[in-house]
Amino acid sequence: MQKVIKSVIAAATAALTLTACASGTTTPGASSAPASSDAPKVKIGMAYDVGGRGDQSFNDSAAAGMDKAAAEFGLETKEAAATNGEAESAREERLNQLIDAGYDNIVAVGFAYASAVGKVAKENPKVKFAIVDDASEASTGDNIMNITFAENEGSFLVGAAAALKTKTNHIGFVGGVGVDLIKKFQAGYEAGAKAVNPDIKIDVKYLTQPPDFSGFGDVAKGKAAAEGMYQSGADVVYHAAGGSGGGVFTAAKAAGKWAIGVDSDQALTAAEDVRDVILTSMLKRVDVGVYTFIKSIHDGTFKAGNTVFDLKADGVGYSTTGGHIDDITSKLDEYKKQIIDGAITVPTAP
């Protein structure tokens, strides 16, 4: 069970930014026809983590799941954006404002919402909640679905890819914020790399430490961290840093080295001028988790509690866009099978 991370930054509560999508309208990434206008309308409120829609990573994956469900089921949706340095009360207010607007099914994107979800859910027992990346005591309840992932398993595979592709036997990892969740990515990455080469050198850098969560949205810090690794000899750098990963890609492009994306297939979502340096991405199917929650609301099958999306459930994996790892996918799939079969147990902490 993940440790509760509670931001206590003493900053003024930022104004809430809310956007709405009317039922039946086409949402970004949607492909299916909306449900019949005669069907009851499900209202979904989405509270994003820092970076929001457009971060090309974690939040965008959550948005994709909502967009798919909205297209299929004819939903009404409303989105609320988090800001850097906001107080805990801002997260609670964001959830309450969505509820007050009539959105009685809420998705909270990110572990930073753990305490807020737990509190607001108790105060609103008829509202159904999903929280991504937390299943701690603070965020569990009869009306809460916890959506968690085996990030360590997916990271093991891209760690193995990095070790198989490096020419210098020197790779790196950039974490956005030094919390237990991101350390799961680091642990898996290191384990995968060392499964290929026990003597490989792995640089590790965290951009910020809690309660400062700006490391998930600071491109300049991401760029500087990766530049230092490339200059010291690393030729593949994996980031688990949200929007800061854009800086890692920029540094890789300038250095003529490889980078590894996270959460989404970033060779499809990153700025076009850096896509060719993205070796692969660790896919964390937040979209699948969010879609699963919304579908359960639509179908009347909602079930509270923790649902873990791992390799076996296709909740994590790796991308092959660009063909850069086509020559090693058979080896990666061997590791994947061993993890699913239990022959390899991937650590969850460094």
Image: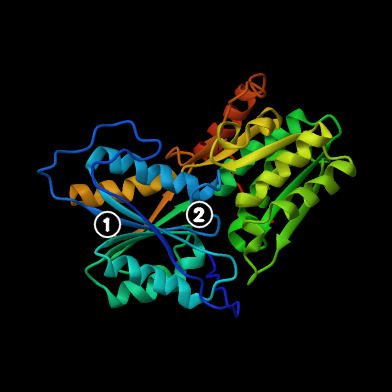
Residue that carries the numbered disc 1 in the rendered image:
303
* Alpha carbon separation for disc pair 1 and 2: 27 Å
Q: Is residue 150 above or below residue 97?
A: above
**Looking at the rendering, which quadrant does residue 141 occupy?**
bottom left
Pinpoint residue 75: horizontal percent, then vertical percent. Answer: 25, 47
Q: Secondary structure at mark 2?
A: loop
Q: Is residue 250 above or below residue 124?
A: above
Residue 333 in view, yes or no: yes
Residue that carries the numbered disc 2 in the rendered image:
52
Which of these two is toward me, 315 or 98? 98
Do the CB atoms of the residues marked 1 and 2 lie less than 8 Å apart? no
Residue 309 in view, yes or no: no
Q: Residue sitting at 79 percent across and 51 percent down?
A: 225
Q: Residue sitting at 57 percent across and 73 percent down?
A: 7
Pinpoint residue 171: horizontal percent, then vertical percent. Answer: 79, 41
Which of these two is toward me, 188 or 288? 288
Q: Is residue 229 left or right of residue 312?
A: right
Within-10-Å neighbours for mark 2: few <14, some 14–19, many 20+: many
Marks 1, 2: nearer the viewer: 2
The amino acid type found where label 1 is placed reads Lys
Pinpoint residue 248: horizontal percent, then vertical percent. Answer: 72, 44
Q: Is residue 286 left or right of residue 179?
A: left
Q: Residue sitting at 34 percent across and 39 percent down?
A: 68
Which of these two is toward me, 14 or 154? 14
Q: Is residue 96 left or right of residue 266?
A: left
Q: How was this image coloured? A: rainbow
The amino acid type found where label 2 is placed reads Gly
Pinpoint residue 307: horizontal percent, then vertical percent. Answer: 38, 53
Q: Secondary structure at mark 1?
A: loop
